[in-house]
Amino acid sequence: MTYFKVVFSFLFILFLVSCGGEETPIEIEYSLNSNSLSIEVNSDITNNGFDDIYITSSALETILCTIDDSSVLYDTLGEYGAICTYITSTGVDSETFTVEVVDTTSPVITSSVVEIVSTVIPSISELNELVTLTDNYDSDLTLTVDSSLVDITTPGSYTLTLYTEDNSGNIGEIDITLTIYNLEIPTYILSIESITETSFVISYDVTDNTDLDDTTFIKMEMKLYDNDVLVDTKESTTIDDYIQFVDIYSNHEYEVEVIIHYDLNKGVGEEVVSTTQTINTLSYSVPTFIIGVTYTTGDSITMYYTYTDPDLVIEAMTLNLYDESNNLYTSVLIDNTINNVVVESTEYDSEFKVEVVVDYNLLDGNGSTGITLPGNTVHTAVLSINDIVVTDNIIDEAQDFTFELSLDYPIGYTIENVYIDDVLVGYTYEESKHLVTIPGSSIVEGETTYEITKIVVNNGSTSLDVIPEDNNELIIILEIPLSISGITVNNGVSYMSPLSNYQIKLALEHYSTYDIQSVTVNGIELSSSEFTISNDELVIMEQAINTYGGFKLSIDELTYLNGSDLVTLEINYVDYLYAGDVLNVQYINTASDFYAMGNSGIYILQTDINIGSVYYLNFLSDFDGCLDGNGYSITGMNLTVDAPENIYLGLFGVLGSHSLIKNLTLSNMNITSTAANTSSNPLHVGILAGYSFGDVYNVTIESSSITITDLSVREIKSGGIFGVSYDSILEYVDVNISTNIQSIYHVYAGGIIGHSDNSIIAKSFSEGDLTVETSSNTYLGGISGYVLGSNTVYNQVGSTLNIEVIADATTKAFIGGINGIQIAGSTSNMYYIGTLNIVGTLNELYMGGINGYTMSSTLESGYALSTFDLGLYPSTAYVGNITGRLESSSASNIITESIYLGTLNDNSTSIIISDVAGYINTLSTTTNLYLYDLDISQVVGSDYTLLENISISIDTNTFDKLVFYGDTLLFDNTIWDLEYTEDVSILKLLNVND
């Protein structure tokens, strides 16, 4: 709407006011000064000429209007209605008038050039590339050209007039100068470089071409024709180059059209010039065939053939067989897709001459040609033995070794019987390989020598005895390898005095023919001067004990010479011995005997005992001796404590640095601790001991539990074996435990150890469940909750412990399938299968399938199948298939398969869920990591290899097994399993008594 101020004639109004009386008023008429108005399309609306529209009256006054132009489309041609509203002495009135939107502006032609240089008049399409047509309204402009003044036969400058007209009849034009010139044709140098049977090479060079001084080279194009049929096209944009044509006929004539593309730099675009070259390819020579006999039987001949030309195409081959009178005996069409031919139904013990007729194609386009090749004279013969191969002549364990007899001319014969040392033996016959296989179990009766003496065959009608011509070449020599039938240490006593000596004796089997070179004990290779052999027994010289307390003995391997070959016999014997007070050895038969133990000494269980009815708290607060379970068990401990100052809870309170617990099972052992807010001393809880400086070997915890409800502001450290360990060694530990902890302060809990410092754990396993409810920091792991110390070594450890944290918004949690947090040391050959679960909302979370948090540590070789449930999700979380955070550490050779439950929600302000670790700093390294069947869209990262079929793909990688409990575990489908063992779950692998 456009508004204008309304002005009345002041004098006229005064006149009306002053005229009173009874006179009749004069009627005034009003009208528009114009009923129409023309406005240029797309013009400025504020200057649209409405000032020229106004009202006139019969009283000769002029009244300006308020204009309503809302129905007018100023960007579209046409007629529109507008309304003029005005005010008179009698009121408000309006008039309608016409607004016509018109186009009177000529289109504009803009050219990017002022001159065109060419040999011809440019086409409209070429000119359209050089000019731009614009109009204030129309967009469908077309270009026309007036070239009537141009004479293309005479070089010179001419005027081209370009026109365009819009839909309203407005015309725009422009003049462009057209300069006509003569076409300059450049030259170039061609050279045929090489010609073969199926290829040729042409070089070209336009570098020194004077005709191209004022031109620009674009490309060289060559077209290959065979009898005017285009075969191939090649091109190059290099000014001097080689062009090669391959895979063409030999001995053939071709035409090559050579085309050079160039630009005269006169603004006219690309020009071409071409020529034709004739090329004749070389001819193939006649190929050379080789015909030979593979083997014969009494009634057949098997032959082979080869030929020397790899480009030859065989069309057909026929083998002709002639008898001794040179008469055609038979003809056989050869299958040229294989390299041998069999002629059957020949006469037994006869000679034949061979001829092969070959039809072949030399790829010259002329079709097939033929050649006749004379072959050898062949003789049909009966089956015979030509060699024997002993697959494995060493008798070890229950191996079913074999002997393989390689046979000449076996086709046409059936093997009936095989005799060794004139004794009939069992056998199998693999006809495709012509091998007779004889199981060693059918003839072996100790260390001896055997001979193949006869094979009975049948040619379809008659049985024939095949006797080796030289039995010396068919001798089987069987060997029984050296083995160890028993090991005795210290005359069978596992304890001794400190600073004393002990002996190791190995009972030998079949050692007399071998020369024993060395024995490795505790990683140290002992030479033959350090042991003696007599009466089938190897005695290792006395070994010195330089310690007090438990120590590990490992007899690793033995080497011996078998002829000139050095053979290694793996022994892998492990035991823990004890150096202590041998005068204080006591045997435990009852619970009372157990409670009579002192703080030191050597104690040996003689039977299973139940201590539940008489057990009292920490009868030994600090035990520094040896308890040898001797394969027996202690059961029934039910320890319920409501004493906040009792800070070491377990079968033992504390194990000293000289202590050793071995060969013991603890079953149905239960600890319950309840405390109010009365103590700040840390609480240490473990089924075996609350705190340990000692060693553990071959100890099993089964069907046991720990329950702690503690409202004191103190740390709780709880583990299936120890609450805390320092400088301890644990080997062959198997824990099955249910732990439930409720606390308001820091919690350190693990399936085996709660808090581990510079300790070693090997060949150990945990299972069960661990549930912690806390509002403070918590460190939870399947093996250990908190691990530190540069001397820490965890090797061959596994866990299926399910871990759950019930938390609030102040809780900070470190949760891992193996360790909650590891600050130093190494963890290797590990696996975890279980669920890591969060209930509620955490403040901060570090969670991983192996470790929750890893710093300054090494993770090497393992597998984690983890189910993560992050609950309502913490405000900050670092979650990884391997570890939540990896700082200044390395992770390698690890397979992970993870399942994530739940969905991220609005509470998640900083959540990183990754393939390897939620966070990896620049000082960390990751290698050989494999990811299988990941089930979460939020995971990011690429530091892994995706395995779609892990049971197949993993065998092609460098990491395909774990050494666990002395067994080799292979990855099969989704679990690690025993090699060569079916239906053995990883959950059953750790029973050391199996």
Image (cartoon, rainbow, N blue to C red):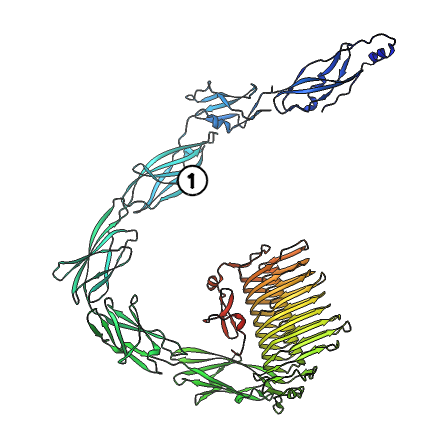
On the image, the x and y values in percent for residue 118 come to: 45, 26
Q: Tell me if residue 568 comes above or below residue 227 in the rendering.
A: below
Q: Which amino acid, mark 1?
A: Ile
Q: Which residue is mark 1?
A: 239
Q: Secondary structure at mark 1?
A: loop
On the image, the x and y values in percent for residue 686 come to: 66, 76
| Neighbourhood count class around disc 1 (C-alpha, 10 Å): few under 14, some 14–19, many 20 upward | some
On the image, the x and y values in percent for residue 461 come to: 19, 70
Is any part of residue 533 visible from this angle? yes
Q: Tell me if residue 936 comes above or below residue 78 in the rendering.
A: below
The answer to which image quadrant residue 194 occupies is top left
* Residue depicted at x 21% and y 73%: 463
Q: Is residue 473 left or right of residue 176?
A: left
* Residue depicted at x 38% and y 33%: 273
Q: 154 or 368, which lies in front?
A: 368
The answer to which image quadrant residue 621 occupies is bottom right
Q: Quadrant of the N terminus?
A: top right
Q: Is residue 291 left or right of residue 442?
A: left
Q: 485 or 907, which lies in front?
A: 907
Q: Is residue 339 left or right of residue 777?
A: left
Q: Tell me if residue 110 comes above or below residue 854 in the rendering.
A: above
Is any part of residue 921 visible from this angle? no
